[in-house]
Every structure is written in C-alpha cells, then in structure tokens.
Amino acid sequence: MSRTKLKKYGEIAERHNVFEDTMPIYKNLKGNWNKEYFPNDQPITLELACGKAHYTTGLAAVYAQRNFVGIDVKGDRLWVGSTVSIEKELTNTAFLRAQIEHLDQFFAPNEVAEIWITFPDPRPRKRDIKRRLTSPRFLELYKSVLKPDGLINFKTDNTQLFQYTLELFEERDDIELLDHTFNLYDSDLNKLHHGIETDFERKFVAKGENIKYLRFKFKE
C-alpha cells in the first residue's frame, strides 16, 4: 500500500464525519443517525458506492435542510468527500465505510428518504447479475430502509445495465417508474442534477456516451 493511501487512512480514522469498523459507534448507527451524528431530524439521502462522493457533497451544498451519507468500501475515496465537506463546512454530510450489501445493518426501516446510485460497476457477466446494484437482491435491501414514497435515482453510461434495470421493473408490480431518459443532457430531467458530475461521467461524456437516468419509488 502506498504512503499516500496509508496517510489518508490514518486521517479518516481521526475524522468526525467518517465512520468505519474501528470506531465504537460503528455498530450503533442503525436507527440513530439523527441522534448520534446529525443534530436534527432532517431527512437522510444516501449515495451508494459513492467513490469521491460528488453527489454527497454537491447535493449537500444545495440542500442545507437535508442530511447526506456517502457509502463506499474504499477509505481513500471517502477521504476525498470528507475533505471537501470539511473545507466547505458541510455539516450535513457523513461518510460510511461499508459494503452496500450490508446496508440494512446501518439503517433502520423508514430511516432513509432518498438514494442515489451513480455510475456503479455494470457487472456485465451473467454470473454477476446478483451483484448489480439494481438487481432484485439490492432492490429488496433498499426497500427495507426507505421511507414510504422514498425516491431512488439511478444514473449510468451503460446501456446494457440501464435496459436490464428497465426490463426488471416491468416484471415487478411493486415499482413505480417516475421518469427515465436515455440522454440526460438532452432532457428536462437534467435540472435535477444541479450540474453535478462524477469523474466517470466526465470521461464517458468526453467519449461521446449518452448518460442514462431514471428515478423510481416502491408502491405502498
């Protein structure tokens, strides 16, 4: 491991806005985010597999009346979002180092108001379908922590993954697809993103890829 990564890991271990398994509070976060960390009852939005947490920090700057949690397993990536939050004094952000498949271990039923899934690994091989973040396995996980009418936003450059997700929704009777587009930048839905772009997004756009987007909720 490089010295730079080691330095970042050491720094996030001391930061108030990052939670990882070395901390006593780590296993007590479920159901307690608005008690143990956020000093308010504002709704919580998650950015899953957040990487450098562009949406966690970007949306937090726009919506001061909401709380945002970026989740990723890579500590050096969380260091970036944590640093941006500290520099910009974004007190409505937090960062959780954890696997997405363990989401229900950190959030209680009805604790989450909204979820963002931005440019996840498309997992193109059939044997990896269950690892796609829009697969049935993960949809049930999201359903277990979302509030009634909670929103999920999904953004990708990958046409195959986007079509897979739309086809999966058609097979289910518990999902209401609210909006979708195969070309976000040429859509009225683009205003929902407040100009926030991830590093992956910039690379894909530079290559001429259209950005796909949808949002949905679970029916009561």
Image (cartoon, helix red, strand yellow):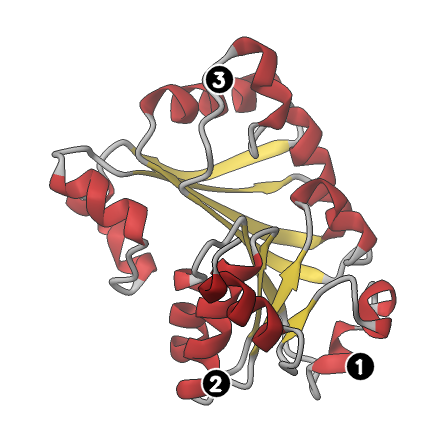
- Which percent across, then down, holds residue 216? 51, 41
- Which percent across, then down, holds residue 42? 64, 78
Amino acid beneath label 2: Ile
Residue at image position (38%, 77%) is 62
Whichever of callouts 1 and 3 sits on the residue coming sooner in the sequence is 1
Amino acid beneath label 3: Glu
Residue at image position (18%, 46%) is 185
Q: Secondary structure at mark 1?
A: helix
Which residue is label 3 attached to? 167
Image vertical order of residue 31 relative to residue 114, above or below: below
Judge depth for marks 1 and 2 and give the one in front. Answer: 2
Q: Secondary structure at mark 3?
A: helix
Residue at image position (46%, 38%) is 120
Judge depth for marks 3 and 2 and give the one in front. Answer: 2
For this view, does 28 lie left or right of residue 62? Answer: right
Please tell me in which quadrant of the rendered image residue 181 appears.
top left
Q: Quadrant of the C terminus?
A: top right
For the question of whether residue 220 can be seen, the reply is no
Label drawn at residue 101: none
Which residue is label 1 attached to? 35
Q: CA distance from mark 1 to mark 3?
A: 39 Å
Which residue is label 2 attached to? 86
- Which percent across, then down, holds residue 211? 26, 38
What is the crowding at mark 3: few (fewer than 14 residues within 10 Å), some, or many (at least 20)? few
Amino acid beneath label 1: Lys
Q: CA distance from mark 3 to mark 2?
A: 41 Å
Whichever of callouts 3 and 2 sits on the residue coming sooner in the sequence is 2
- Which percent across, then down, holds residue 66? 55, 76
Please tell me in which quadrant of the rendered image residue 155 appears.
top left
For the question of whether residue 71 can be seen, the reply is yes
